[in-house]
Amino acid sequence: MSLETLFKYDSKSRNANEFINDDEILKTISEVESGDYNIREILDKASLMKGLEPKEALALLLCNDKDSENEMFEIAKKIKLEIYGKRIVLFAPLYLSNYCINGCVYCPYHAKNSHIARKQLSQDEIRAEVIALQDMGHKRLALETGEDPDYASMEYLLESIKTIYSIKHKNGAIRRVNVNIAATTVENYRKLKDAGIGTYVLFQETYHKPTYEKVHPSGPKSNYEYHTEAMDRAMEGGIDDVGIGVLFGLYDYKYDFTAMLYHAKHLEDTFGCGPHTISVPRIRPADDVDVKSFPNAIVDSLFKKIVAVLRIAVPYTGIIVSTRESQKSREEALEVGVSQISGGSRTSVGGYVEEEEENSKQFEISDNRSLDDIIKWLSDIDYLPSFCTACYREGRTGDRFMAFAKSGQIKNFCQANAIITLKEYENDYAKEETRKSIDKVMANEIERVPNEKVKMKLVDALKGIDEGRRDFKF
Ligand code: SF4
Ligand code: SF4
């Protein structure tokens, strides 16, 4: 008998082995693989845009019937359009320190990698990076650090967040700082909340405990339970926007996909609010990381299907892809569900100011285009790029945000805020050619603001931006 069989599935338990229950996940997979489901009923339920149970979502993911597959892609596109419209929110990662005491075998920052260039940014260096990011047009950052009590302490992080929010360069401002740092205590999460962070992001990497322990052979991150229960502590600490994700390729995708939905269900059942975002990174080549040693790596067609089924299963959770993905793969994922992407990213410490050294990146980027190129590309393929950060600044977080989202009211705000922030980008940062593309998309999208009063205010705000004012928001 495995240790896990001692635990029983309970979505509201605070024990990782119970809300991510190995027996329950294996049972779910086995039932779906033996055909114990009705695809018609699941597709009909999916069309209602109210989400799916983990087993139903897995059944869609494993269904290879071409007609059903096409239907699920159509449903995913419809949900995406209905809830998110054409908007795509943009952000950039900012690496503060790559010192790390963990031994993650898939990451070049692991403690034993002696030939990587290590660096921790000083507050002055952070200032320079942030100004470089502001000069690109970014408003929303995801802070990244390795885990190290000396080179990535909570005090350092809090000071860095303060520095970032304080920088006002020309018309630039970072208005939302999301944080992706190691699992920590309730007290530390409370400090992060008080520092005004947006979303706390922590990837599970893999939910499969034996694999988790194998790929995390040393350091604090090797504690599966402490890591898996991190979002519960974050929520206890008052952070109600949390972002989850797995690193597809570490273990069997069926297991991790199903477990991730059980995690979302746990948060919803326990705290009344599911994850704010789900990220879908895939294993990528990097210094001292041998991709060939990961036989579970997933192909593009499966990646697209995972995104589509997630869109259907958790309609109100944002889906994020990074520049790990190629332009082509991002384009496909955008169509069926992705609502947030990074742009113009550097994945090394100090990479926005200095040329990146080959051996200092956390992973290889597939989409190397500049932010301006990304904005032009999105506009040309009829998306509405957005730098909106309004919700958390207006107190719309957690269950309050979900109530707005589920009632459909959020659409008015999102659409108008997207247009306002794109207009700011156009006036302050866009190249001439990009402006033409933006003008085209904006003319169409103003008409799509559902509420007439909001539309009138929006038109006023756009005039205000032309007159030099900034930071209008709904
Ligand atoms: Fe450190 Fe994070 Fe890399 Fe693991 S994934 S080695 S914790 S930086
Ligand atoms: Fe996101 Fe809120 Fe802005 Fe909509 S209004 S894009 S939900 S921050």
Image: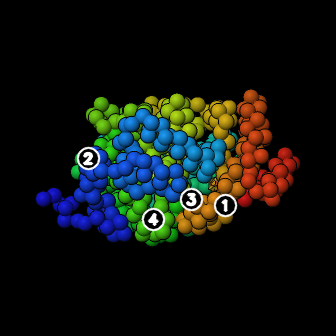
* Mark seen at residue 268: 4
Residue at 48%, 69% in the rendered image: 272
Circle 2 — which element? loop
Taking the image in four quarters, ligand 2 sits in the one at bottom right
Which-is-in-front pick, marks 3 and 4?
Answer: 4
Tell me the CA gap for discs 1 and 4: 21 Å
The quarter holding residue 454 reads bottom right
Q: Is residue 237 above or below residue 365?
A: below
Q: Nearer the viewer, mark 1 or mark 3?
A: 1
- Secondary structure beneath disc 3? loop
Instruction: Find residue 136 and report its image quarter.
Output: top right
Q: Look at the image and tell me whether residue 347 can be seen.
A: no
Give residue 421's position: percent from left, percent from top. Answer: 72, 48
Q: Are marks 3 and 2 in contact (CB under 8 Å)?
A: no
Tell whether 75 sits left or right of 375.
left
| Residue nearest the observer in this picture, 263 or 161 | 263
Foreground of the two, 325 or 414: 414
Classed neighbour count for the residue bearing mark 2: other residues with Cα under 10 Å, few (<14), some (14–19), many (≥20): few
Q: Earlier in the sequence, mark 1 or mark 2?
A: 2
- Give the residue at x 62% y 49%: 82
- Kind of element beneath mark 4: helix
Q: Circle 1 sits on which residue?
A: 409
